[in-house]
Image: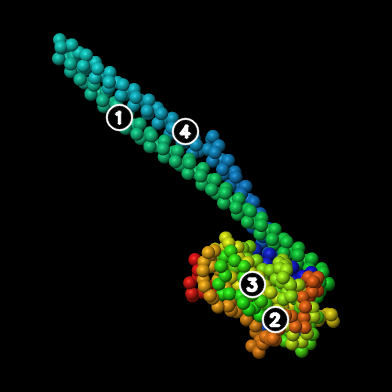
Amino acid sequence: MKIRRVLATAVAAAVTTPVLLLSVTPAFADDKPAAQTQNKPSIAELEKAAAAAQAAYDDAVAAEKAATAAVEAAVADDAPLKVAAEVAKTAAAEAATAKTTADQAVLDARTAMDDLPETATEEKKAAAKAALAEAETAAKTAADAKAAADAKAAEAGTALDDFRVAAFRNLDATRKALKKATDDKDAADAALAKAKEEEAEGGEDGNEDDTCVPEPKLTTVVTGLPSTVVAGTKTDFKLRVTNGTDRTLDEVYPFVYVHATDTSGLKGLDDLVHLQWSSAKSSTWKNVDNEHYIDRVSPLKAGAHADIKMRLTVDAKAPAGNGVTFVAGDYWNEDGTCGGSPDLEGYEFMIAAAGSKPGKVPDATVGTTKPKDSNLTTQTGASASPVGGTLAATGSSDATSQLALASGAALAIGAGAVFVVRRRKAGSHA
């Protein structure tokens, strides 16, 4: 079991119960100060989250079923609004026929009056005139009736269309809600399953990590990362891991995690930012693994440091935004002792849109995440190559499992899930 698996449990659970992320913080042995002792979500909490997700899913299924039935009813031939629209349409057609007949009667009456011979009596002329007037009155009545029938037909048709559109929109909304509820349920179920698996792997009491302790003198410092990075470019910088203790640390695991958002701080851009690393003596670039670790430094002697070359790549399609690179270090000794940096260091930078020319900018600085030990200092040396520590070629070890609750690095995925980069007062590049 590795550190990231522990954090993935809490992050997945937070899909349905975000408050659980509040507990994704370092936890150490019982003899540590209470302020440093916090727990990951319990099985009971995850079961509660899974039950809530199941209930939400059941409600979403019922809502989608009801919406489907409503659509079927709305398009049925015997739907009340459909029947009303058909009746109104028929009435409008009959009114149109009546108007046509009345208009023809007017033409016939006018023709009859015009065809009277000059020898027609005054009585016949008066009768023809009266017939025309009567036909014109009837035609006007028919025209008014047709206009009213057309209006009713249009109103009934609009009511039917609106009803159907609303039914289909509601169906679409319930289907989207069902998909989200399904995803949330799957995430909550997966979180619970992982937690149970990890509890089983941790032994009967599930406390395999209680021996790990915070070590503020194991420091990680970033240099050379600019405060503004242009999308579509690669930026090289350096990570220095220093053992400021008075003992050798057998295996040290540098942790590096980059998180970014757009300028609103609401849209994550993590899939558009990438980290690679290389040892000081190698020209080969390797991807940071999916648990945000690079290969271990083994060993790292007291007072020594190791330098790792880092490369940040921001995809060209990334919009302007803000980012932060978190760093920390964990260690594991052959005698079973373990621990790590009690906090993450977060180096903030801005992302400028592709093609921007920000000019010379200062290096990124540590933001709101800072070490709690104000006396912590970085070990320095004249050489830029690793001193007393080398990057092992075999990659990270499963020994990191016991670091899961011991290091500030354990915050990273949780922090990444809820972290919104602090918006700067200075304007960002468009």
Looking at the picture, which amino acid does disc 3 mark? Asp
Nearer to the camera, 236 or 367:
236
Quadrant holding the N terminus: bottom right
Q: State if disc 2 and disc 3 touch (CB < 8 Å).
A: no
Q: Which mark is residue 384?
A: 2
Which residue bears the numbered disc 4? 86
Q: CA distance from mark 1 to mark 4?
A: 23 Å
* Sequence-wise first label, 1 or 4: 4
Give SS at disc 4: helix
Q: Which mark is residue 141?
A: 1
Which residue bears the numbered disc 3? 236
Between marks 3 and 4 in the image, the one whose residue lies nearer the viewer: 3
Give SS at disc 3: strand
Residue that appears at 24% across and 17% down: 111
Label 4: how many residues lie within 10 Å, few (<14), some (14-19) or many (20+)? some
Residue 211 can be seen in this image: no
Q: State if disc 4 and disc 3 touch (CB < 8 Å).
A: no
Vertical arrangement, residue 235 with respect to residue 77, above or below? below
Nearer to the camera, 124 or 385:
385
